Structures are given as C-alpha cells and as structure tokens.
Image (cartoon, rainbow, N blue to C red):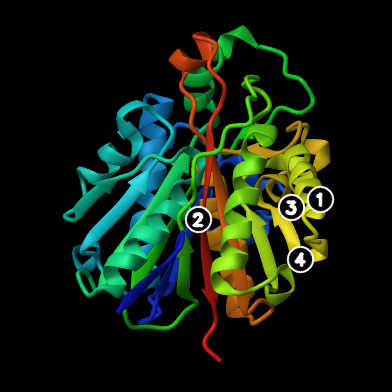
Amino acid sequence: MMTAKSQTLTFSSRPKITAGMSVVGEREGNGPLGGYFDTVTRDPKMGESTFEKGESVMLDKAIRGAAAKAGKDVFDIEALFAGDLLNQLVSSSYAARGLPVSYFGLYSACSTMTEALSLAAALVNAGYYSTAACATGSHFATAERQYRYPLEYGCQRPPYAQWTVTAAGCSIIEREGDGPAITHATIGRVVDYGIKDLNNMGAAMAPAALDTMLAVFDDTHTSAEDYDGIFTGDLGRLGGEILRDLCRERGVELGQRYSDCGEMIFSGDQKCYSGGSGAGCSACVLNSFILEKMRRREYDRVLLLATGALMSPTTSCQGESIPAVSHAVILENDI
C-alpha cells in the first residue's frame, strides 16, 4: 500500500536503488568529485557530429551502464523515466529510441531526477513494475545556446551565474534487491518569488527548495538532525547561502550535513562562477558520490531535493519571472 500525506508519498515496500551510473565531461571529471564518477569523457560530442547527439549518447551510456551494474540487460528494464533540458526532450527521446523499454519523457528542469525517482518508486511500490530506470542529463554546450547565447558569442557572466554540467546519471529501481531504499517522495509546489535574471537561478530556486524541505519535515515528522546528509540539486554557492538563511529565519539550522550538488561538483579554481547546474547535476552526484557514501554506510539516511527553474527562452524574453519547483526523495539504508 502507498499512503498519501499532504505532499508526501510513503512507500511501504521500500523500492531499492540497486545500481547507479554516472557519465561526465572533462571539466566535471577534473573537479572535486572526479574520483567518484564511473566514466569521464574528454570528447564533449562523444564521437558524434553535434553536441546534442553527444548528450543523447551520454544518457544511453548511463542507462546501459546502470543496468549492467545491476546485473541486468536493458531488456530487463520495464520502464524508463528520463528527461533533459532541451526542447521536446530530444536527448532523452533519442536515447530511448534505441532501448526496448516503455518510456516516460519527463520535464521538471533541473529537478527532473527526483521527479523520475518519485514516479518510478510509486509505480514499483504499487506493483506495476518490478524494475525501472531513472535517467537525466544535461550538457553545457546544448543548454547554453538554447537558453542563453550562441557559444561563439563568448558572453561574459556575473559572478553569481552557474555553469551547466555536462553529465548524465541513471538509477535502477527494483522492488527487491540490495541498495538504499526510497522510503518517501515529496512532490514540490511551484514557487515564484519574482526573480527575472536568467543568470540568478540559485535565487529563483532556493524558495522552492525551502518550501519542499519544510513539507518533508512536517509530513514525515522529521527534522534536519534526523538526516546524515541533506543535498539540494543545483542552487550553487549563492543559492545554497540563500537557502541556509531562509531556513534559519524559520528556526531550521542545516549545519554541516547540508551540501549543494552544484557547489560540490566544481572547485573554485575551475572558474565556474557560483557552481554547477543542469538536469545532469544532481543525477551524476547521486549516482556516484551519494550512493557510494551510502554503500560505505557513511550515510544511512539522506534527503535529496533537486531544484528546477521552469522558465523558457520565450517567457524570459516576454519579461516573465522564473517559477521554480523542488521534488524530494528520502533514501535509507536497511538496518
């Protein structure tokens, strides 16, 4: 049975993440988490003729690699929940066309990974599937020219801007198996504090992360102290500081247990401004660093809140503000 309580779903069968796979670009591989990633590619086009094709290949490698690490063939995957940042989800859809699985194309911007985990866990928990894959990816070159400026333009950025991560990550979700359980999923609400600056994603998304985090604590009767690690998807350094301040105003002290995937993935000397962003950001950190820490039992209970800015180039040109959403999952090791 699955029970709904406010925004949070509780999964009684405790679906497991039995394997994870991460594929990243050269800049990401040279960052602080480089030793945790499964594959670091030096070719941003992955041997293809365009960056978009390369992004699709990264997703394909992540999906097939995760299946292999779980001891399965792609034919064993019953459903794929995948998304990216490009129009019509072309990276995910083109990756899916070569896979013999039912396909759910998802878009929740940079929060797509936790949306995928939430939906997959719900359907596995309900018994509709026994094995599902959740995958998201992003690419600096493809996102930059879709959402901002042509790459050749060489546009300068303010220091609070973020760098879209070139990465893909995939998790295999199974009803039975070894690995951290997805015990809860909190489905976020769309929050808009009126931010219009396309370079200031952290400020736009931090209120959404706060809204979902407070819903998690309220719905599950937990507090920040009950988690070994709390991770947001890609608020970056500035957005992470804003979230800490917003939490502090409400009497919540996150302390050393809190980190942001976008801040973790690049070091200061890599000149990536406020840190990383993109649908592949939380996906690759989850399927490398976080799962490895849980495997080693350094973390037994983790709260992951991926965050997404839901604007488009058209709405931004029309002067609209940037709505944001954050979906969360709680991961727990079996005692």
Is residue 182 visible in the rendered image? The answer is yes
Crowding around mark 1 (Cα neighbors within 10 Å: few <14, some 14 to 19, many 20+) is few
Q: Furthest residue to the bottom?
A: 335
Q: Who is closer to the viewer here, 14 or 71? A: 14
Q: Mark 4 points at which residue?
A: 257
Tell which circle, 3 or 1, labels the residue nearer the N-terminal end.
3
Please tell me whether mark 2 or mark 1 is closer to you in this view: 1
Q: Who is closer to the viewer here, 205 or 154? A: 205
> What is the secondary structure assignment of the residue under circle 4?
helix
Q: Name the residue under label 3.
A: 32
Left or right of 234? Residue 47 is left
Please tell me whether mark 3 or mark 4 is closer to you in this view: 4
What is the spatial separation of the Cα atoms under label 4 and label 1, in whole angstroms? 18 Å
> What is the secondary structure assignment of the residue under circle 1?
helix
Q: What residue type is labelled 2?
A: Ser
What is the spatial separation of the Cα atoms under label 3 and label 1, in whole angstroms? 31 Å
What is the spatial separation of the Cα atoms under label 2 and label 1, in whole angstroms? 36 Å
Q: What residue type is labelled 1?
A: Glu
Crowding around mark 2 (Cα neighbors within 10 Å: few <14, some 14 to 19, many 20+) is many
* Percent of width and height locating residue 281: 57, 46
Q: Which amino acid does label 3 sit on?
A: Pro
Tell which circle, 2 or 4, labels the residue nearer the N-terminal end.
2
Quadrant of the image for the C terminus?
A: bottom right
Q: Mark 1 points at which residue?
A: 249
Tell which circle, 2 or 1, labels the residue nearer the N-terminal end.
2
Picture quadrant where residue 2 is located: bottom left
Is residue 72 visible in the rendered image? The answer is no
Please tell me whether mark 3 or mark 1 is closer to you in this view: 1
* Percent of width and height locating residue 288: 57, 62
Which residue corresponds to the image point at 52% horizontal and 15% vertical from the top-left? 316
Q: Is residue 118 above or below residue 52?
A: below
